[in-house]
Image (tube, rainbow, N blue to C red):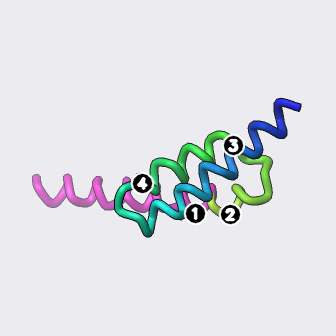
């Protein structure tokens, strides 16, 4: 029973986060990340989104390291 509530809450967070990408008042990225964290890796909705977020994070880390090397 608790798994159904967790799934419903995670999907709701992701949907509100998607709306927040368009609306200026709602923090979209933060709500999407929270929804992904609630749903976990075993949910079919999250797998592609989670892999995209990991790829994006690794790309950002590479840019930061390159920027630090250029500063020195």
| Residue at the disc numbered 3 | 9
Asked whether, in this view, residue 22 is left or right of residue 3, the answer is left
| Residue at the disc numbered 2 | 48
Q: Decide: marks 1, 2 in contact (CB < 8 A)?
A: yes
| Residue at the disc numbered 4 | 26
Q: CA distance from mark 2 to mark 4?
A: 23 Å
| Residue at the disc numbered 1 | 52
Q: Quadrant of the N terminus?
A: top right
Q: Is residue 13 above or below residue 3?
A: below
Residue depicted at 75% across the width and 46% down the height: 8
Q: Residue 16 appears in which quarter of the rendering?
A: bottom right
- What is the magenta segment's predominant secondary structure? helix
Q: Secondary structure at mark 1?
A: helix
Q: CA distance from mark 1 to mark 4?
A: 22 Å
- 10 Å crowding of disc 3: few (<14), some (14-19), many (20+): some
x and y percent of residue 44 in the render?
Answer: 79, 58
Residue depicted at 28% across the width and 55% down the height: 64
- 10 Å crowding of disc 4: few (<14), some (14-19), many (20+): some
- 10 Å crowding of disc 2: few (<14), some (14-19), many (20+): few
Q: Secondary structure at mark 4?
A: loop
x and y percent of residue 30 in the render?
Answer: 46, 48
Q: Secondary structure at mark 3?
A: helix
| Stretch of the chain drawn in magenta | 50-72
x and y percent of residue 29 in the render?
Answer: 46, 55
């Amino acid at each position: 029973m608790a798994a159904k509530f967790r799934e419903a809450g995670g999907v709701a967070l992701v949907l509100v986060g998607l709306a927040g990408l368009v609306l200026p008042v709602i923090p979209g990225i933060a709500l999407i990340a929270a929804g992904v964290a609630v749903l976990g890796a075993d949910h079919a909705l999250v797998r592609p989104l989670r892999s995209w977020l990991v790829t994006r994070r690794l790309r950002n880390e590479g840019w930061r390291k390159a920027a630090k090397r250029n500063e020195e």
